[in-house]
Amino acid sequence: MQKFTLLNGLVVPLDRANVDTDAIIPKQFLKSIKRSGFGPNAFDEWRYLDHGEPGMDNSKRKLNPDFVLNQPRYQGAQILLTRENFGCGSSREHAPWALEDYGFRVIIAPSFADIFFNNCFKNGLLPIRLDAEKVDALFKAVAANVGYRLQVDLERQSISTPDGTAYPFEVDAFRKHCLLNGLDDIGLTLQHVDEIKAYEAKRRAAQPWL
Amino acid sequence: MSAQTLYDKLWNSHVVRQEADGTALIYIDRHLVHEVTSPQAFEGLKLAGRKLWRTASILAVADHNVPTTGRAQGIADPISRLQVETLDNNCAEFGVNEFKMSDVRQGIVHVIGPEQGATLPGMTVVCGDSHTSTHGAFAALAFGIGTSEVEHVMATQCLLMKKAKAMQVQVEGALGKGVTAKDIALAVIGQIGTAGGTGYAIEFSGSAIRALTMEGRMTLCNMAIEAGARAGMIAVDDTTINYLQGRPFAPQGEQWDQAVTYWRTLRSDDGAQFDAVVRLDAAGIRPQVTWGTSPEMVVAVDGRVPDPAAIADAVKRHDAERALQYMGLSANTPITEIRIDKVFIGSCTNARIEDMRAAAAVAKGKHVAANVKLAMVVPGSGLVKQQAEREGLDKIFIAAGFEWRDPGCSMCLAMNDDKLAPGERCASTSNRNFEGRQGQGGRTHLVSPEMAAAAAIAGHFVDVSENH
Ligand code: SF4
């Protein structure tokens, strides 16, 4: 997994609540048996004017000029600013894969759906929960300033704005450790093989039908 | 020891170890696998040279991509076919038990687990699919996971997670005629919102829940995720135990008795504390119909499409406006005046035998309205299909002008050929009315099987509670 330590990135505002994973990556792209290459189809139905299917040459498709990700001022954005309950619906990890492949490293929202939130950390993406008022203030700042960037410091758990305001944020100690070091969960868990085996033995004795 | 919730009991009995910050290693008893979220996990295992920790814990099935007609000819779409073949190959290579497309036991993963008795009380059950919450109906701790976690469970039989908070949703009283578990689910979501359960595990309780069959309980727990909760669950009672007895994967003989004794302890203790409590009066729940692009955008069938102008919260108002535009609806339209183009009866929410019976009872001796282009019934599994045919339900549907299909996810998410065309409006028994979910530009209204069948016959929504 990619490490995440510090990022100074351009912010793109997606002003919608309850953005679901079907919208982040529509189902026709879930037919892929690979883990990469989903970026060009992130938000496919909003991003393009035609209907996307796997195998199309996305560079030849007509972009929807009204969709915020397509606006020239937001090209190269690495921070997605959005509203509450982001990533709801399907558990598809293709959603964080698509966002990461598109180039995002940080998503800021008042709240996230649980499974999506979890999936982000497995893919080097940092989802940050911030109070709705602060998110609102950021939306206003982004709208007012072309080229608006934020600095996200995971070690210090802080977001800094260009005018010097700092927004602290919470992150689980364990997840932070994994993200800072780019650690693979499976490798970590396999350090506890003996404990898992001991648990299994105990369980088999108590509930032999399992 | 202090009084414990059902969730506490399930959680505590699965903790292998715990970190200082509360992150726990949780042991997983049952792992259900399907073709869409597993290929990258199997690939990850192979690349790292890892093995499956406990092959027997896995049950695999292809459901999302399978065709619902002409199955003998195989899958026409080469990309879908590759995905199903990849599952077949991975299962063969790793020795995983798989119900292949030609197997009568094949079906939607959340239908076949319980049907086989592969989901048992007291288990932790995971699947790379958010509707894994369904299995909580059996007092199992069941939740959806991402593909990285699928790989993690395959390699370690465990998951790293933190305990959620506990929410009790208590529904007391008797449901009215024509009101179902689906309507309870939609009413709960209407009340708490699609993020209302975020961070919680929900336990459904109360006399209305105890009166539900296992099929109804599965419908309800299935939709817990639409309320934002990763897990929904219901305590064990006679209904649970009677359902499980004799199922192929359920214990037998002495072990059955031993298991039942344990299972009977799987309920919240008297006086157990929940972090949040939501109460609903069953008698007050009417048949529900969603009007927008999120399951929380729902009203009773005798209601009207809401007027966004009346919504105070700016973000919500904006969402409602967008939703009405996408849905092609205007404010204040009575729900019963909304005409539909297609009907879909199926999905892991409502494709069990009871759902088939309920829809058939409404359709019997009637005919699908002329304005309805397609009304399809897609049973949840080959065994549900067989049972329905034994009862003659297929004949009722076909005589009424419905199509009777082979089992799979079908138009719930439209990954196969079953999909809505842009602008088409569908009465659907599935669980998500998101934009494009049932086909790009398609418009979905979520309802119960009774309501979907009645809408097919009338050509628009009707109140089944009056017709009863
Ligand atoms: S029926 Fe629908 S919700 Fe259920 S598993 Fe299949 S696609 Fe998912």
Image (cartoon, coloured by chain):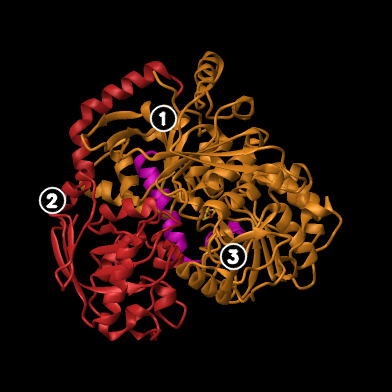
Q: Residues within 10 Å of mark 1 (few under 14, many from 20)?
A: some
**In this rendering, is residue A196 above or below B327?**
above
Q: Nearer the viewer, residue B8 or B397?
A: B8
Q: Which chain is orange?
A: B
**In this rendering, is residue B175 above or below B461?**
above
Q: Which mark is residue A21?
A: none
Could you tell me residue B308's position as x and y percent? 57, 72
Quarter of the image where one finds residue B432: bottom right
Mark 1 and mark 2: Cα distance apart in space: 32 Å
Chain to which the residue tagged by mark 1 belongs: B
Mark 1 and mark 3: Cα distance apart in space: 41 Å
Is B218 one of the magenta-colored residues?
Answer: no
The amino acid type of the residue labelled 3 equals Asp
Chain to which the residue tagged by mark 2 belongs: A
Mark 2 and mark 3: Cα distance apart in space: 45 Å
Q: Secondary structure at mark 1?
A: helix
Q: Which mark is residue B418?
A: 3
Q: Which residue is mark 2?
A: A181
Q: Where, quadrant-wise, is the N terminus of chain B in this rendering?
A: top left
Colour of chain A in the rendered structure image:
red
The amino acid type of the residue labelled 1 equals Asp
Could you tell me residue B455's position as x and y percent? 74, 62
Q: Which residue is mark 1?
A: B8
Establish whether labels 1 and 2 are both on one chain.
Answer: no
**In this rendering, is residue A197 above or below A23?**
above
For ligand 1, tell me if the residue under mark 2 lies within 8 Å: no
Q: What is the magenta range?
A: B68-96
Q: Nearer the viewer, residue A193 or B467?
A: B467
Q: Secondary structure at mark 2?
A: helix
Question: Can I make out residue B104 in this image?
Answer: no
Could you tell me residue B15's position as x and y percent? 32, 29
**In this rendering, is residue A162 above or below B263?**
below
